[in-house]
Image (cartoon, helix red, strand yellow):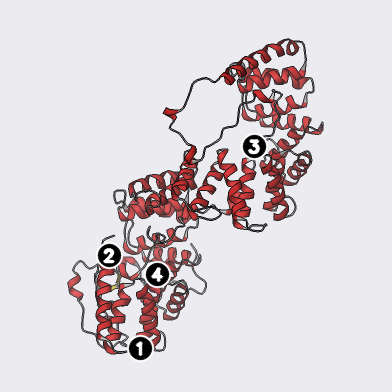
Amino acid sequence: MTTTQGTPDRGPDDVHASEHGGIASNPSQSGPTAAGDMSADSEDADQALQSESIDPQDSDGLAHGLGLLTRGALSGHDTNDDDMGHSAQHAEMPHDTISFPAFDFARVYAVPEDLMPAPPRIPDPEEATDPQEADTTPKARDIALSVKAAETVERLRQPAKYGDSQAMLASADLYTLGIGVRKNLSTAYDLYRRAADLNNTDAQNALGIMMFRGEGTDQDKRRAAELFRTAAQAGNACAQANLGLLYDGGEGVERDSQAAAEWFAKAADQGVAVAELGLGTLLFNGRAGRQDLGLAAEYFERAARQGNAIAQFKIGIMKYSGIGVVRDLEGAVAWFVESAHQGLPHGETALGRAFYEGRGIKRDFRKAGYWFWEAAQQDFAIAQGALGDMYRLGHGVSKDMTQAASWYAKAAEHGDTDAQFHLAVLYERGTGVEQDYGQAVDLYQEAAAHGDGRAQTNLGMMYAFGEGVERDYDLAFDWFASAAELDDPKAQTNLGVFYEQGMGVEKNLDNARVLYEEAAKHNDPTALWRLGIMYVRGKGVEQDYEKGADLLAKASSAGEFHAMMRLADLYDQGLGVPQDDQMANVLREAAVYESTKRLSR
């Protein structure tokens, strides 16, 4: 665990959780007092309540006399943090998804084109029909194709029997695809092997694919690499592309990006889409000896025009985000549509994102949900999390926290950190699921371990208040420090509170002020409130009522009810603001409303 730069090391005399005992159970012992000297530096002048109910003097957020934090003193991330906008966290497609391996073998089939099965197409929402209503009546064309396929099988039988390698190859393709015959991979393997022995390079390539996958035979990746190499050296473009894939992934051969690039380039020169995609990916990642985003985009687009769904998604992401190319939202969406219709979950999710954000296409939450759902059926975690976001926020569907929790759970199982965070919040709050602090802590820890600053902050909160774990200010400090290094404003604020109060670390008002100022740049309400109090009281800074009032006003505008109460005191006394009893009363009424709203969550 790391801490912020310049943070003093904690010694044996620092405050530890075990020295504080439990939170006061009788809040009435520290009730409100009349407004007095606003500049007093004594913490005893500020009375705090255990709960978040209103106390006009609660500026420090400590349980009086015990040095324990109350809930109002710190700020954590909630599921409501992003409910004011239209951008769900999971609608964002991470840029690193563009670099996932292009592992889709290249091959050609020696089967008449009109007999090849049509590629599956995912319909648009308005085209989708209920499967129970689908017309399953055989069409005359389908019957005719079945007859032609059977005739083709019979026509190839004799030439294949007597050593025609091309007839063997075509027959093997028919058995592989189940066209005109019952699908039989063992028979297909035998036919490919016989044709490969006759130096048919297409058969060698097909046999290599079967051996790599273990289809119709035992899996043998090294032997597959040998077959690809034999065909590739004889000039077979598909085999060259496939050998490049093996070098790129280190499958059956030692990983070698340079060798992968060389074989991809040979195949790309012959127009093999898989090779164009592979070479583009190496150039994008800088693993082909150099990084060249512009050239990567050219290769992606070449492969995309040939119908490669992964390339269509990748060039779409580059255009959507303006990575290496001029941003073109409409052009990006057009490629997402092509990729989504082929059923690639990345493309489906990206199209859903475009509909969700209304960028490059008219916003439509219903269509966004449709494409997220299609991708979620393939266990694509980002899409599952996006559905969780939609149910949580009520975008395009009725708000349903139980459904949100269900989708987050599916995504969390696949290691999605955003889903782990949101599900943890639901368990912590008992929203959509039964409250379970232990489960919340486990999920926060999983997301925190993968660098999620929100999860690290909330995990620090759990340790600070002893929820699901033993109260431990040292661990709370460490998690806040880790999240603060990720520029999480709530963590910066909480770390400032620890320095201000000397909890889990030596008291240091300068460090507290600096951290509050950093968080205040992000308009964190708690930071604005606490920094405002420091200026009002002259605590660690030169006293400045006007600056303090300005900070408290900003915090109040963000709904921080503690700030409203302190600002009301300033209006009562005319300190830093004109004396105005009416404004003071309005602020106190607003504070009561905000406090009640927060308690009702």
Q: In this view, does 385 lie above or below 103?
A: below
- Residue flagged by tag 2: what amino acid is it? Lys
Residue 597: mark in rendering: 2
Q: Which amino acid does label 4 sit on?
A: Asn
Per the image, label 2 sits on a secondary structure element best described as helix
Q: Distance between the residues labelled 3 and 4?
A: 48 Å
| Residue linked to disc 1 | 576
293 over 166 or under it: above or below: below
Callout 4 secondary element:
helix
The picture places residue 234, in percent across and down from the top left corner, at 82, 31
Q: Which of marks 4 and 1 is in front?
A: 1
For marks 1 and 2 on the same chain, the one whose residue lies earlier in the sequence: 1
Q: Label 3 belongs to which residue? A: 104
Between the residue at mark 1 and the residue at mark 2, the CA separation in whole angstroms equals 29 Å
Instruction: Answer with mark 3 or mark 4, whichever residue precedes in sequence.
Output: 3
Question: Which residue matches tag 4?
Answer: 494
Q: How crowded is mark 4: few (under 14 residues within 10 Å), some or many (20 or more)?
A: many
Of badges 3 and 4, the one in the foreground is 3
- Across and down, in percent, residue 244 comes to 72, 39
